[in-house]
Amino acid sequence: MIPIERNPFTIRIGGLGGQGNIKMGLILANALTTDKKWVIQTQHYGAQVRGGVAYSDVLFCDDPIDFPIAYNFNVLYMMDQKPLNSFFHLLKPNGVLICDSTYVKQIHVNIRRITKKILVYPVTEICIEKFGMAVLANVMGLGILQKATGIVNLDALKKTINEEVPEKFVDVNLEALEYGYKLCDKCYTLKEEKKYMPINFE
Amino acid sequence: MYKAGDYVLMQGDKACALGAIAAGCRFFGGYPITPATEIAETMAEELPKVGGKFIQMEDEIASACSIIGASLSGAKSMTATSGPGFSLMQEAIGYASMTETPCVFVNVMRGGPSTGMPTRISQGDIMQAKWGTHGDHPIIALYPSTVKETYTLIIKAFFLAEHFRTPVIFLMDETLGHMRESFEIPEIDSKFILPRLSGEDLEDEEIYHPFESFNDTTTPLMSMGKSKFHVSGLVHDETGFPMGSSSMAEKLLRQLDKKIRMHRDEITTYEEYMTEDAEILIVAYGTAARAAKRAVKLARVDGMKIGLFRPITIWPFPNARLVKLLQQVDAVLVAELNLGQIFQEVSRLNKQKKLLRLLSRVDGSLIPPEQMLEAITEMRIELDEY
């Protein structure tokens, strides 16, 4: 039997246009690149306007990734009710679901059949309360995502934020990242998928 | 700017633009169109830093003409567009072909025909790249499948354009253009960067005949201001002036065709994956080949002997190698995101009537590896009964 590359870990960040979910995917992908992973980042590309569903997918693996599109996900980070309703069935069994409860008001009962690893924080509310800016919600989300899954190095995230974010907002973004990191108290390890089951032809 | 050895995350379109700059491209005339806009954006930002010029033209026709002018006056030049824009550029491609002007046309393919699906993937312009412009003309078309390959292959596109003095079509697709992928910036082989002739190589200004051909190779182009010559899209002699004689026309057209046809083996490149003992061969290219590679791996785990043949040079098509493989395998599956444009090409070569199937998809999504695996498994069962 020939060795076959592992399936990549997959993350989907979904929200409404304007919430910064694509920027969040970009920062995450860049940070993973700093960690020398094989990374692919794709995003929903369409006539998106503020208020329409938008998402950004990040795939990463230690091995080369052949196929750039993912059809189900290890982690879903949902910033709004609409994308959660459309994407929850794409979550892998026992995957991690993180929701911003400022906008996600109801978590469908079927989701609990897929996973028990559900984290809910009022991220945007905290951002407005602590920093007076809702735009930091995505970076705070990255902090939560880092703590909850440990997929990416915190220093790599900080380094990427330094490069990606306009200079005068770097400090407040880093604070938000730290805050998100401290906010989350759960830590799950993502499990690698089971080996592909062959149907021996010979 | 990035340097060789950097491990970066880059969008396909950006890699195309930065690769072109590394290849020595110093002029870009273009008009924004999804999904090729990011190429123009990157060029607008990066070209002035290296002393190049970026112009946003009024439309695609002007863009294509501007890069021909720029190339003839000494700058390596490129334009980037997508389906509808590519249709507008066709006449200029013919002009570049007839006047033997080196230039690169990037076509980031999207769903067609007409405005079609601007944000969805397709591989529908394969035949248009070859036969889009009127008249018999030679063409070189390249098609990468990863972001890293986009960066290296565009350098080769410029090399081929300069070496054979022909327009080169650089095909990409929407997914490849918009996808960000990590890769290590490779070292560039300096032999792929051809400078233009300087005036010193010329003994006497009068004897430079830019359209003269020796042993099916063309005369390299002179840099700006070093020599004067006439350029015309009419049938011309070696000096470039139009000629009415029919024997001249025959000679010119055959010579244009020969300069590519006789060097097919130098030009064509392809990737083979596990073809040594393959019984079923998948022919796929571009982003579709990535799914095919995964399907080959999955099929091998199942104990099926599958191989992948991926043409990197789409035109001229790597016939010679594929004919050899067709003798060796029992069946061929062509997987592509159009209604069978390369399938036709393969079936033309299938002289032994091997089992040949097409897996096509035109809904603007990629073919998943699982769907390919399913098609292969069906073929394998069919093969036992064939």
Image (cartoon, coloured by chain):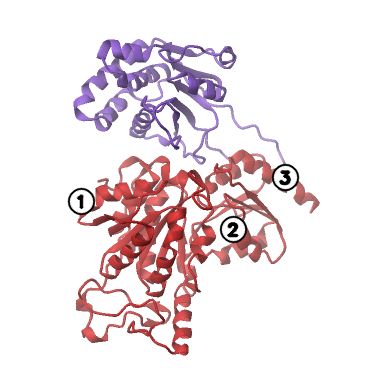
Chain colours: A purple, B red
Residue B240: image quadrant is bottom left
Please identify, in this view, whether the residue under mark 3 or under mark 1 is nearer the observer.
1
The numbered mark, 2 or 3, whose residue comes first in the sequence reads 2
Question: What's the residue type where badge 1 is placed?
Answer: Lys
Q: How far apart are marks 1 and 2 (CA)?
A: 41 Å
Q: Residue B378 got which mark? A: 3
Tag 1 secondary structure: helix
Q: Can residue A79 be seen in the rendering of this structure?
A: yes
Tell me where residue B24 sits by quadrant.
bottom left
Frontmost of labels 2 and 3 is: 2
Going from N to C along the chain, the mark reached first, 1 or 2, is: 1
Mark 3 residue element: helix
Q: What element carries label 2?
A: helix
Q: In this view, does B351 lie to the left or right of B211?
A: right
Taking the image as shown, residue A128 lies to the left or right of residue A150, namely left
Position above or below: B300 against B199: above
Instruction: Kindly identify which chain the residue marked by label 3 belongs to.
Output: B
Q: Mark 2 points at which residue?
A: B341
Q: Residues within 10 Å of mark 1 (few under 14, many from 20)?
A: few
Which residue lies under the disc numbered 1? Answer: B49
Q: Residues within 10 Å of mark 2 (few under 14, many from 20)?
A: some
Residue B278 appears in view: no
Q: Looking at numbered disc 2 in the image, what kind of residue is underneath it?
A: Gln
Residue B77, image x, y percentages: 31, 61
Which part of the image, by quadrant, shows the C terminus of chain B?
bottom right
